[in-house]
Image (cartoon, helix red, strand yellow):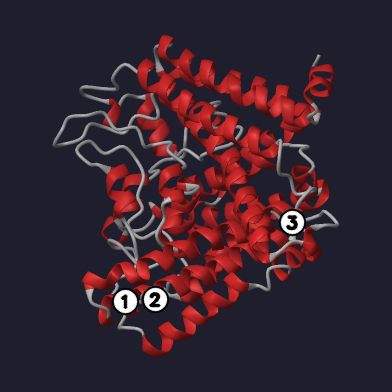
Amino acid sequence: MVRPLAGHLGLPPGTVLFTLALFASVPIGAGFQFIRGAAAKNLYSLTTGILLSLFAFGSSTVEVAFFGLASYAAMALHRPSCGYVVFAGSFGYLIYYHATSASGEAWKAGNIDITGLLMVLTLKVTACALNYQDCLMPEKELNEFQVRRAVTALPNLLDYAGWLMFPCTLVVGPAIEYRDYLDWLNKRGAWGGKGCPVVWTKTALTVGYALIFMCVHMYIMGIYTIDNTYLSPEWDTKPLWRKFMELHILGQSMRGKYFFCWVWAEAACIASGIGFSGYDAVTGVAQWVTAQNVRPMGVERAATFVQIPHNWNVQTGIWLRHYVYDRTTPKGKKPGFPQLLITQVVSGVWHGLYAGYWLFFVSSAVFVHGSKSVFRWQREHFPKKWNFVIDGPHWLLTTVGLNYLCAAFMLVTYEQCMGAWRSVYFLPHLAVVAMCIFGEVFGGKKKKAKAAGKGEQAGMEPGSRNGPAVGTRPAEEEAKKTE
């Protein structure tokens, strides 16, 4: 049934299966509204998650069982180091799977396999194990995030399995924290007391929002593709302005695909109720950010590179911040460029072994650092009333630079990535290197960071936090964060 449909649409069968599974996540999520009791919800989550994975990825679903059982065994057998064991083991296996399945080339061709699902599970099992291990420390040594995510006892096996296979985020993420799942399951925290409001209107609006991005992506890809731009024989003969224009359009189109997938998954979570995150303390309006993984307008209007991680792949950014960035910062020290670079390298490894991913994330670390350097100089030395003189060009470089870097994500191989960047003379890279040098020579003093693990720290995700907390306005707070 799928192959004729794929042939009619002109798409690989893997893409069609993936898309149908993604579409199914919203009605499956809505099904939670009609189920009462934690055990029944767990069974529904586990069953629908397995069926969804079998439909989209077939026999590869056995990999999920391996991931889950191995991680749970590590937590059960040796709590003092289970977080490190699960981190190393899950990333090691993910790297192996990336290599053996040639995931980068497969995704580039549209043949979507189970690797993306394993990427989501890697974030989930490592976070759960580290939070379980952390609870051996005295509570006074834990930061606010660790206390909020604390896993004080070995998870119930049914709870763990239901959370691992949670169908609303299984295919494209984001990774829901185990504590959030438990609170939702047992109607605690934001889901207790007054509880979650009616979800249908918010779900419908979010579905409509996602479909807009799907339509934009499909329309643009019907005109511009990597084959008739970067990889076409005519590419090198085009004028520089035309290359940057097409580079910009392709970058926008690629993001439209991710916008659609993540906003659709957010709609599925809203339909289930887990996307709810409490009521605004001032207005009393319901907030829905627990599973919010992208803020499209925040990405497109980002004035600096530092603002992009706050709006793009948000939940993965929060995971990187708290499980990599913070944990590689020496106790009592403030984080800096080494921690940012380590975090970006981990992000690159998580995405795969192809050079394009490494080039993208290592370059983005330099772009973020350059953006901070100019911001510090501007804050210390430039009159506020004249900020627009710098803000305009900075925004333009951010927009052009982001779409320029996206080429690496689309092309994935080293030769093609470097060829695309070389064709525009590496101009965004050169501009950012100049920003870094300028900032080091003329920049203002860095703001004093708070003790590691407490409050906000400089870096990739300053101020990021997740989780339903009644009386907070997390979406608005995060959107306002800059450097």
Q: Nearer the viewer, residue 172 or 377?
A: 377
Work out how far the residue at label 1 is from the one at label 2, CA to CA, in angstroms: 6 Å
Identity, as a three-letter code, of the amino acid under mark 3: Val
**Residue 478 shown left or right of residue 119 in the figure:** left
1 and 2 marks in contact (CB < 8 Å): yes
Residue 407, above or below 273:
below
Residue placed at 34% from the left, 63% from the top?
453
3 and 2 marks in contact (CB < 8 Å): no
Query: Callout 2: helix, strand or loop?
Result: helix
Residue 142 is situated, as x and y percent measured from the top left of the image, at 32, 58
Q: Tag 1: Cα neighbours inside 10 Å, few (<14), some, or many (≥20)?
A: many
Work out how far the residue at label 3 is from the one at label 2, CA to CA, in angstroms: 30 Å
Residue placed at 76% from the left, 46% from the top?
108
3 and 1 marks in contact (CB < 8 Å): no
Q: Tag 2: Cα neighbours inside 10 Å, few (<14), some, or many (≥20)?
A: many
Residue 42, above or below 63:
above
Residue carrying label 2? 374
